[in-house]
Amino acid sequence: MGSKTSLLRRRLLAGTAVLVGGPAIWRSALAQSRQRPTPSQTEGPFYPVELPSDSDADLLVQGERRYTKGQPLWLEGTVSDVEGRALRGAAVEIWQCDQNGHYHHPGDPGADPLFQGFGRVAVNTDGAYRFHTIRPVAYGGRSPHIHLKVKLGTRELLTTQVYVQGDPGNARDILWRYLSTEDRAALTLPFESAADGQRARFAIVVAT
Protein backbone atom coordinates (compact mmCIF):
# COMPACT_ATOMS: atom_id res chain seq x y z
CA MET A 1 0.00 0.00 0.00
CA GLY A 2 2.78 2.33 0.99
CA SER A 3 4.78 1.57 -2.14
CA LYS A 4 1.76 2.28 -4.37
CA THR A 5 1.19 5.62 -2.61
CA SER A 6 4.85 6.49 -3.03
CA LEU A 7 4.77 5.63 -6.74
CA LEU A 8 1.63 7.72 -7.26
CA ARG A 9 3.21 10.65 -5.42
CA ARG A 10 6.34 10.48 -7.62
CA ARG A 11 4.23 10.46 -10.78
CA LEU A 12 2.21 13.45 -9.60
CA LEU A 13 5.39 15.36 -8.75
CA ALA A 14 6.91 14.52 -12.12
CA GLY A 15 3.77 15.74 -13.90
CA THR A 16 3.82 18.98 -11.91
CA ALA A 17 7.47 19.54 -12.81
CA VAL A 18 6.66 19.19 -16.51
CA LEU A 19 3.79 21.67 -16.24
CA VAL A 20 5.91 24.19 -14.33
CA GLY A 21 9.09 23.73 -16.35
CA GLY A 22 7.42 23.25 -19.73
CA PRO A 23 6.82 26.93 -20.63
CA ALA A 24 10.41 27.80 -19.68
CA ILE A 25 11.69 25.01 -21.89
CA TRP A 26 9.44 26.11 -24.73
CA ARG A 27 10.57 29.73 -24.36
CA SER A 28 14.21 28.63 -24.43
CA ALA A 29 13.64 26.59 -27.59
CA LEU A 30 11.83 29.54 -29.19
CA ALA A 31 14.65 31.93 -28.28
CA GLN A 32 17.19 29.56 -29.81
CA SER A 33 15.18 29.32 -33.04
CA ARG A 34 15.04 33.10 -33.46
CA GLN A 35 17.45 34.43 -36.05
CA ARG A 36 20.15 36.92 -35.16
CA PRO A 37 19.43 40.40 -36.56
CA THR A 38 21.79 41.68 -39.23
CA PRO A 39 24.38 44.04 -37.68
CA SER A 40 23.89 47.73 -38.36
CA GLN A 41 26.57 50.17 -39.47
CA THR A 42 26.80 53.89 -39.99
CA GLU A 43 25.01 55.43 -42.95
CA GLY A 44 28.13 57.35 -43.90
CA PRO A 45 28.30 60.79 -45.49
CA PHE A 46 27.18 59.89 -49.01
CA TYR A 47 23.51 58.84 -48.87
CA PRO A 48 22.04 60.76 -51.85
CA VAL A 49 20.78 64.26 -51.10
CA GLU A 50 18.60 64.00 -54.21
CA LEU A 51 17.58 60.60 -55.50
CA PRO A 52 18.16 59.96 -59.21
CA SER A 53 15.09 60.07 -61.43
CA ASP A 54 15.84 56.45 -62.26
CA SER A 55 16.03 54.67 -58.89
CA ASP A 56 15.23 51.12 -59.90
CA ALA A 57 17.14 47.90 -59.18
CA ASP A 58 19.44 48.13 -62.23
CA LEU A 59 22.21 50.62 -61.47
CA LEU A 60 23.89 49.99 -64.82
CA VAL A 61 21.02 51.16 -67.04
CA GLN A 62 19.33 54.56 -67.17
CA GLY A 63 17.04 54.77 -70.17
CA GLU A 64 19.28 54.37 -73.21
CA ARG A 65 22.45 54.95 -71.23
CA ARG A 66 24.63 52.04 -70.12
CA TYR A 67 27.43 51.95 -67.57
CA THR A 68 30.13 49.60 -68.83
CA LYS A 69 32.96 50.17 -66.35
CA GLY A 70 33.79 47.77 -63.54
CA GLN A 71 32.65 44.20 -63.00
CA PRO A 72 28.89 43.62 -63.22
CA LEU A 73 27.42 42.20 -60.02
CA TRP A 74 24.10 40.68 -58.99
CA LEU A 75 23.46 41.42 -55.32
CA GLU A 76 20.49 39.41 -54.12
CA GLY A 77 18.92 37.87 -51.06
CA THR A 78 15.93 37.94 -48.77
CA VAL A 79 14.55 40.14 -46.00
CA SER A 80 12.95 38.40 -43.02
CA ASP A 81 12.12 39.08 -39.39
CA VAL A 82 13.81 37.30 -36.47
CA GLU A 83 11.17 34.55 -36.65
CA GLY A 84 12.20 33.79 -40.23
CA ARG A 85 9.07 35.24 -41.84
CA ALA A 86 9.40 37.16 -45.11
CA LEU A 87 9.07 40.88 -44.45
CA ARG A 88 6.39 41.72 -46.97
CA GLY A 89 6.04 45.37 -47.87
CA ALA A 90 9.69 46.13 -47.13
CA ALA A 91 11.94 48.05 -49.51
CA VAL A 92 15.70 47.62 -49.87
CA GLU A 93 17.98 50.48 -50.96
CA ILE A 94 21.63 50.32 -51.94
CA TRP A 95 24.13 53.04 -52.81
CA GLN A 96 27.82 52.92 -53.66
CA CYS A 97 30.61 54.73 -55.47
CA ASP A 98 31.35 54.33 -59.16
CA GLN A 99 34.37 52.50 -60.56
CA ASN A 100 36.54 55.57 -59.94
CA GLY A 101 35.53 55.87 -56.28
CA HIS A 102 33.01 58.75 -56.50
CA TYR A 103 29.48 58.97 -55.10
CA HIS A 104 26.57 60.95 -56.48
CA HIS A 105 26.70 63.51 -53.68
CA PRO A 106 27.53 67.23 -53.39
CA GLY A 107 30.33 66.35 -50.98
CA ASP A 108 32.03 64.11 -53.56
CA PRO A 109 32.07 65.74 -57.00
CA GLY A 110 33.14 63.88 -60.08
CA ALA A 111 30.77 60.91 -60.11
CA ASP A 112 30.19 59.31 -63.48
CA PRO A 113 26.65 60.26 -64.60
CA LEU A 114 26.32 56.95 -66.44
CA PHE A 115 26.37 55.07 -63.13
CA GLN A 116 23.05 55.30 -61.30
CA GLY A 117 24.78 54.94 -57.93
CA PHE A 118 21.54 54.31 -56.00
CA GLY A 119 18.81 51.72 -56.31
CA ARG A 120 15.61 50.78 -54.54
CA VAL A 121 13.44 47.68 -54.88
CA ALA A 122 10.37 46.34 -53.07
CA VAL A 123 10.77 42.75 -51.86
CA ASN A 124 8.45 40.16 -53.36
CA THR A 125 6.02 37.96 -51.43
CA ASP A 126 8.88 35.65 -50.45
CA GLY A 127 10.93 38.59 -49.14
CA ALA A 128 13.39 38.37 -52.04
CA TYR A 129 15.24 41.30 -53.61
CA ARG A 130 17.80 41.64 -56.40
CA PHE A 131 20.06 44.43 -57.71
CA HIS A 132 22.25 44.70 -60.80
CA THR A 133 25.25 46.86 -60.04
CA ILE A 134 29.07 46.69 -60.01
CA ARG A 135 31.47 44.94 -57.70
CA PRO A 136 32.38 47.63 -55.15
CA VAL A 137 35.80 49.28 -55.25
CA ALA A 138 38.00 50.87 -52.61
CA TYR A 139 38.23 54.63 -52.17
CA GLY A 140 40.18 56.74 -49.69
CA GLY A 141 40.81 54.65 -46.61
CA ARG A 142 37.78 52.41 -47.11
CA SER A 143 37.78 48.87 -48.41
CA PRO A 144 35.23 47.93 -51.09
CA HIS A 145 31.67 48.01 -49.71
CA ILE A 146 28.04 48.63 -50.63
CA HIS A 147 25.72 50.61 -48.38
CA LEU A 148 22.30 49.12 -47.73
CA LYS A 149 19.11 50.25 -46.02
CA VAL A 150 15.82 48.45 -45.27
CA LYS A 151 12.60 50.42 -44.90
CA LEU A 152 9.04 49.43 -44.05
CA GLY A 153 6.72 52.26 -44.94
CA THR A 154 8.19 55.37 -43.33
CA ARG A 155 10.26 53.36 -40.84
CA GLU A 156 13.96 52.70 -41.31
CA LEU A 157 14.60 49.24 -39.92
CA LEU A 158 18.27 48.79 -40.79
CA THR A 159 21.25 50.66 -42.21
CA THR A 160 24.40 48.67 -42.83
CA GLN A 161 27.25 47.92 -45.23
CA VAL A 162 28.40 44.73 -46.94
CA TYR A 163 32.01 43.84 -47.73
CA VAL A 164 33.92 41.55 -50.09
CA GLN A 165 35.20 38.35 -48.55
CA GLY A 166 38.96 38.00 -48.85
CA ASP A 167 39.62 41.62 -49.85
CA PRO A 168 43.03 42.64 -48.45
CA GLY A 169 41.73 46.11 -47.60
CA ASN A 170 39.24 44.82 -45.03
CA ALA A 171 41.83 44.55 -42.27
CA ARG A 172 42.74 48.23 -42.77
CA ASP A 173 39.16 49.49 -42.94
CA ILE A 174 38.24 51.24 -39.68
CA LEU A 175 34.58 50.15 -39.74
CA TRP A 176 35.25 46.53 -40.71
CA ARG A 177 38.14 46.22 -38.26
CA TYR A 178 36.01 47.07 -35.24
CA LEU A 179 33.27 44.57 -36.06
CA SER A 180 33.11 41.49 -33.88
CA THR A 181 34.07 38.18 -35.48
CA GLU A 182 30.40 37.23 -35.68
CA ASP A 183 29.40 40.56 -37.23
CA ARG A 184 32.21 40.37 -39.77
CA ALA A 185 30.95 36.97 -40.86
CA ALA A 186 27.43 38.38 -41.28
CA LEU A 187 28.47 41.38 -43.39
CA THR A 188 31.39 39.98 -45.41
CA LEU A 189 30.10 38.17 -48.48
CA PRO A 190 31.67 35.72 -50.92
CA PHE A 191 31.60 37.15 -54.44
CA GLU A 192 31.32 34.32 -56.97
CA SER A 193 31.85 34.36 -60.71
CA ALA A 194 28.90 33.68 -62.99
CA ALA A 195 28.28 33.73 -66.73
CA ASP A 196 26.70 37.20 -66.57
CA GLY A 197 29.02 38.80 -63.99
CA GLN A 198 29.52 38.15 -60.32
CA ARG A 199 26.99 37.20 -57.65
CA ALA A 200 26.77 37.89 -53.95
CA ARG A 201 23.96 36.79 -51.66
CA PHE A 202 22.98 38.73 -48.55
CA ALA A 203 20.20 37.38 -46.31
CA ILE A 204 18.92 40.25 -44.16
CA VAL A 205 17.24 39.76 -40.79
CA VAL A 206 15.58 42.75 -39.13
CA ALA A 207 13.90 43.24 -35.78
CA THR A 208 10.53 44.83 -36.39
Image (tube, helix red, strand yellow):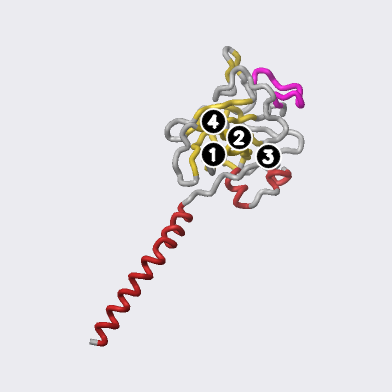
Mark 3 and mark 4 lie on one chain; the one further toward the N terminus is 3
At a point 70% along the width and 39% down the height, the residue shown is 143
**Which amino acid does the dot numbered 2 rest on?**
Leu
Q: In this view, does 45 lie to the left or right of 126?
A: right
Residue type at mark 1 is: Phe
Q: Identify the disc placed on residue 148.
A: 2
Q: How far apart are marks 2 and 1 (CA)?
A: 10 Å
Q: Mark 4 points at which residue?
A: 153
- Local packing at callout 3 (Cα closer than 10 Å; few below 14, some 14-19, many 20+) is few
Q: What element carries label 4?
A: loop
The vertical placement of 2 against 192, above or below, is below
| Label located before the other in sequence (2 or 1) | 2
Q: Which of marks 3 and 4 is in front?
A: 4
- Earlier-in-chain disc, 1 versus 3: 3
Residue extending furthest left? 1
On the image, the x and y values in percent for residue 122 come to 50, 28
The magenta region covers: 103-115
State which mark lies toward you, 2 or 4: 4
Looking at this view, name the residue that lies furthest to the bottom: 2
Amino acid found under the numbered disc labelled 3: Thr
Q: Earlier in the sequence, mark 1 or mark 4?
A: 4
Q: Distance between the residues labelled 3 and 4?
A: 21 Å
Asked if residue 180 lies in the magenta stretch, the reply is: no
Q: Residue 184 in the image: state x and y as whole percent.
A: 62, 47
Disc 4: CA contacts within 10 A as few (<14), some (14-19) or many (>=20): few
In the picture, the disc for residue 42 is: 3
